[in-house]
Each structure stands twice: as structure tokens, then as C-alpha cells.
Amino acid sequence: MTNDPHALFRAWMAEARASELNDSNAMALATVGADGMPSVRMVLLKGHDERGFVFYTNRESRKAGELAADPQAALLFHWKSLRRQVRIEGPVSLVSDEESDAYFATRSRDSQLGAWASDQSRPLDARATFEARFEEVQARFEGGDVPRPPHWGGYRVTPVRIEFWQDRAHRLHERRVFVRDGDGWQEGLLYP
């Protein structure tokens, strides 16, 4: 049994990739609005290492505005087929332009075009409006590479707390918690 939460996460993620039917990298991202109201939505984990957990989005979206005002977040992975979940809490920082560019280049062309066409989280009068904008962007970049929009990029959640929850019979679950302590981690157990 490892006492390194990143190694444990990698092991659990590998099992989830093999067992989850769709989006084993889906995670709930919780932020807080200016009014103190929590907000949660699903995003996809696109990178993980000892520095943290990375996702990408429109930096003019609601979530981005909330992170700009209060750069802290909580993440939750729930792998139903494995009967496990991982909770992560920590400060959030922007991913470098170079890292954002590299990831953007791996996206499908339509996803790249969609990043240009969408005013994510803003009101939309009709689906046809968005579809027309998508067609305009297609024409704009026809025959060439699609660069990363300046308003689109990555965020990194640097964990200060990671909890691993494993379902057990009769609700006698196992909960391991790791809390950042300087350059290392303090490990403990929680009652189910």
C-alpha cells in the first residue's frame, strides 16, 4: 500500500480507464461565486502529475470568473463500477500558454473550432445562432491550422488534501486522507 497519494491516484485511474464505460477522466469541479454560492459542473481531467490536476476551458466562462475571484476548487472523481471516489481540494492556477497550446493542438478540429465559436456560459437566443457562428469559424480557418483562442486555456488544481473512498459491505467504507505537510503528506484514516 503506497503512502504517495499521486501514485495511488494513478493506480486507481488506470483501473477506472479499464472499467468505466465512458469518460473515466470525468470529474466534478466545485467553485464558489461572488455571492458565496457553490457551483459544480463536470469537466475532464486532461493531465495529472505531482504539480496537480489539469483541465481546460474557456477563460471567460462562469467557472473561470469564479476561479479568478476565488482561486480555490474541489474536485470529485466517482467511479461507480469500481465503487470508489477521490476528493481533491486546493488552490488553482493557470496552466502556461505553452502547455495550453500543446494540449489544444491534440483536440479534434471541430473541438478547436467550437472553442472559437462558443461564448461559453453566456445566454444563447437559439441553437441556430451558435451553429451559424460555428460555420463562420469553419470558413475563417478553412485549409489551415486552428490556433488556440486567447480566451481558452488550462487550470491546475494543486492538491492540499486528497481523500480516497472505497466502498465496503454494510456501509463500513474505507476512507484514506492525505493532507499536504510542507513538501510531503500526512496520511490518516477517517470514519466512514
Image: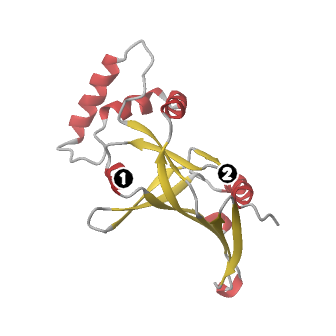
Comes first in the chain, label 2 or label 1: 2
Query: Which element is circle 2 on?
Result: helix
Quarter location, residue 152: top left
Q: Give the residue at x 26% y 29%.
A: 133
Q: Position of residue 50 (x, y in %)?
A: 66, 50
Residue at the spot 68% in from the left edge and 87% down from the top edge: 170
The answer to whether the residue labelled 2 contacts the one labelled 1, judged by CB atoms less than 8 Å apart, is no
Residue 134 drawn at (x, y percent):
30, 29
Q: Residue at x 72, y 56 (%)?
A: 15
Residue that numbered label 1 is attached to? 63
Secondary structure category for the residue under label 1: helix
Residue 175's place in the image compared with 76, above or below, is below
Q: Which residue is mark 2?
A: 17
The residue positioned farthest toward the top in the image shown: 143
Q: Is residue 11 left or right of residue 156?
A: right
Mark 2 to mark 1 CA distance (whole Å): 26 Å
Instruction: Give the image quarter of residue 1.
Output: bottom right
Camera-side residue of 6 and 20: 6
Crowding at dot 1, Cα within 10 Å, few <14 / some 14-19 / many 20+, comes out as: many
Q: Residues within 10 Å of mark 2 (few under 14, many from 20)?
A: some
Work out whether residue 6 or residue 119 is closer to the camera in this orientation and state it. Answer: 6
